Image (spheres, rainbow, N blue to C red):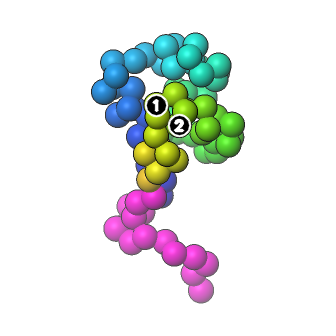
Amino acid sequence: MIKCHLSRLMGERKLKVIDVARATGLHRNTITLLYDETAVRVELEAMDKLCEFFGVEVGGLFERTADSSGVAKTGPQP
């Protein structure tokens, strides 16, 4: 499971979705989906713009965690 830390990063800086949209040029819907962690996919350009804006590496924006059963998936399962 992939966790997005956008809401934390925005909260620390007291930013609204529209603030990030204007600063990065990304669509508000893209930011909202990431903020709510409901995005199904993310374009590399969007990731790059957000990382640059917040001054973080990709790992500061996204984190791979264990799934809901507590087990990290490592590859194809038989």
Q: Is residue 68 left or right of residue 58?
A: left
Circle 1 is placed at which residue position? 54
The x and y percentages for residue 48 are 61, 38
Residue 68 colored magenta? yes
Q: Residue at x 46, y 31 (%)?
A: 54
Query: Which residue is disc 2 drawn over?
Result: 51
Say which residue appears at 49% left-offset and 14% top-offset.
Answer: 19
Q: In the rendered image, is residue 36 in sight?
A: no
Kind of residue at badge 2: Cys
Q: Nearer the viewer, residue 48 or 1?
A: 48
Q: Looking at the image, is 2 positioned above or below residue 25?
A: below
21 or 52: which is nearer to us?
A: 52
Within 10 Å of the Cα at label 2, are there few (<14), some (14-19), or many (20+) other Cα atoms? some
The magenta segment: 64-78
- Disc 2 secondary structure class: helix
Determine contact: label 2, label 1, CB under 8 Å.
yes
Query: Callout 1: 10 Å neighbours few (<14), some, many (20+)?
Result: some
